[in-house]
Every structure is written in structure tokens, then in C-alpha cells.
Amino acid sequence: MLGAVKRVFFIIMVGLWGAFIALAFASPETPNDAWQWTRGLAWPFQILVWIVFLPWMVGLWVWQADWSFGARLAIVAVLAVGWSAASFPRRK
């Protein structure tokens, strides 16, 4: 049973990163809008969002930075691969 949960978590992780990168290419302002929406939340809700969605919040933080498109994309890609690899289900 635990193996199935790990697989589902991995699929969700990869799917959300795929959606993040697709949005970044299709509409580069959408991740910035998501960042601004999160920043507009009350502090307790901001903390909750950061805890629940930590990898993607770090990705949003990088994306809204005033860096070149290539640098932001490279860092987000490294984050996506790293977090996805860390969540890959392994056998004991």
C-alpha cells in the first residue's frame, strides 16, 4: 500500500512541475500572478501555502526574480528534476 502512495506522490510531483514549466512557456506572466496572489494572502495562509507547496513556491520565487529567462528556466528545471528525483519511489 505504501508503494502505491509513493507512486501517486511521484506522479503528482512530476505533473505539477510539468504544469509549472508549461505555464512558464505558454504564459510567462502566469507564475508571476500566482506569486503575487500568494503574497497577498494573510500570513498564516502564506505559511501554510509555503509548507504544503514548498518546491513550487521556491520555483515561483526563482521565476519572479529579475534574472534572464534562460537563468530562471535553468534553475526551475534543476529544481524540478531534483525534487522529482528525490520523490521517486524506491524499493527498500
Image (tube, rainbow, N blue to C red):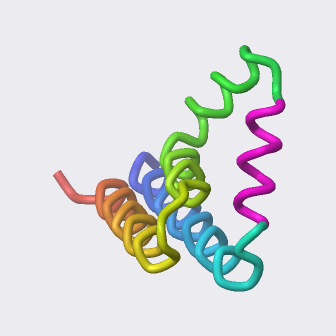
| Residue depicted at x 59% and y 75% | 21
Residue positioned most to the left: 92
Residue positioned most to the top: 44
Q: Position of residue 86 (x, y in %)?
A: 30, 55
**Image quadrant of residue 3?**
bottom left
Q: Is residue 1 left or right of residue 19?
A: left
Q: Is residue 73 left or right of residue 63?
A: left
Per the rendered image, the range of residues in magenta is: 30-40
Task: Give the dominant element type of the magenta stretch: helix, strand or loop.
Answer: helix
Examine the structure image and report whether residue 59 is included in the region drawn in magenta.
no
Q: Position of residue 27 (x, y in %)?
A: 76, 78
| Residue depicted at x 83% and y 32% | 40
Q: Is residue 21 left or right of residue 75?
A: right
Q: Is 41 rendered above or below residue 32?
A: above
Residue positioned most to the bottom: 26
Q: Position of residue 5 (x, y in %)?
A: 50, 51
